[in-house]
Image: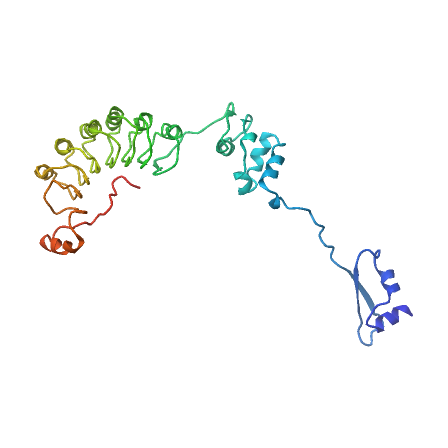
Amino acid sequence: GILSQGLDTESTPTDLILHLSPPPHKHQRLISKGKENDSNQFVLGRRSRRRKESLGISWDHLPDELLLRIFFCLPLHDLVRISAVCKRWQRLFDESLWHSVDLEGLTHTGLALQQVLRTGIRRLRCPRSFVEELHLTGTDLSSSIIPTLALEDIICRCTLLECLSLEGLQLSDTIISLAENPNLLQLNLSGCSAFSAPALAGMLKACSSIDQLNLSWCSFDNNHVKSVVNNLSSSVTHVNLSGYRESLTLDVKVLVERCPQITTLDLDSTLLMADCLPVLKQLKHLLHLSLSRCYHIHLAALDVFGLVQDSQLPSLKKEMPHVSINSRPFSTIARP
């Protein structure tokens, strides 16, 4: 009959497929097998896998402008949630979406607050929130692009700082007033500006544990220098005052008298006279002294960048075999 014919031929008859298979719109493939000398032969029908239906255009293919129009229809609490979907959505924002944000009712506002503040909102409401204090002990914001007011908000909330580097930033008297950080050990203000001499003096009085201080190439005058040498902790060991173009002879004398524990002193590119050398000799613990580009003193066993040509360095080292010449091209004082 039809069954036996179907088993003896390579192709299964159409009516047999229709008899064994579901409706014809579902594509099937019929497999027939048999064993020799076996009267109980059978036919196995298997459905083909259904192809996935097209889901349309992917979200990844939508332009930023269209996504913003879609996000504009969402409430603000959903905007905060979708910002955690992917990095692209997190970076995608427009000022029109974030005029004001209400975070009332959130148990943990930390992550949400971080995300909404990044968008530049104008008004924020999060009553009965708990914002923890900063527990930073070390902060390096050197050469950062940060508004002075934003930097004030960060520094003024820190009370446990031990190492702080603000190199190259425009500061303020509020930032310099680090009186709430009595455990400060290392302070790097190299290349900083916009702070007054009284504020600097007050900070040095309050932070009496400073061990390393870097004030190289700062934008200040002689009043700032006097604030440093007259108020710096007597236990300081590393000091960098390089880059000050006025006379430092008298100030160096005060510094040596008040801070006898100095081991590293960098006075690179300052106006020093030869009579400073006997004063510096009083520093019994001095291990490294940098006087590069101090053209008014005689050559000594120190850093002499810019004073001696490279071809003459071997002979200079030969004359002073127990002294390292030009061993530190860059100052590491108070730098992280």
Q: Position of residue 87 (x, y in %)?
A: 53, 42
Of all residues shown, which one is farthest toward the bottom?
37
Question: Dividing the image into 4 quarters, which one contains the N terminus?
Answer: bottom right
- Image coordinates for residue 226, horizontal then vertical, percent: 18, 28
From the viewer's side, name the closer residue of 152 and 45: 152
Check the image and name the residue furthest to the right. 1
| Viewer-closest of 148 and 156 | 148
Residue drawn at the location 88% of the way across and 71% of the way down: 5
Residue 136: x and y in percent read 37, 34
Total tally of numbered discs in the picture: 0
| Image quadrant assignment for residue 227 | top left
| Above-or-below relation of 307 to 256 | below
- How did the renderer colour the structure? rainbow
In this rendering, the answer to whether 217 lies above or below 176 is: below
Placement of 134 over or under 310, stated as above or below: above
Q: Quadrant of residue 215?
A: top left
- The C terminus lies in which quarter of the figure? top left
- Residue 230 percent across, percent down from the top left: 18, 28
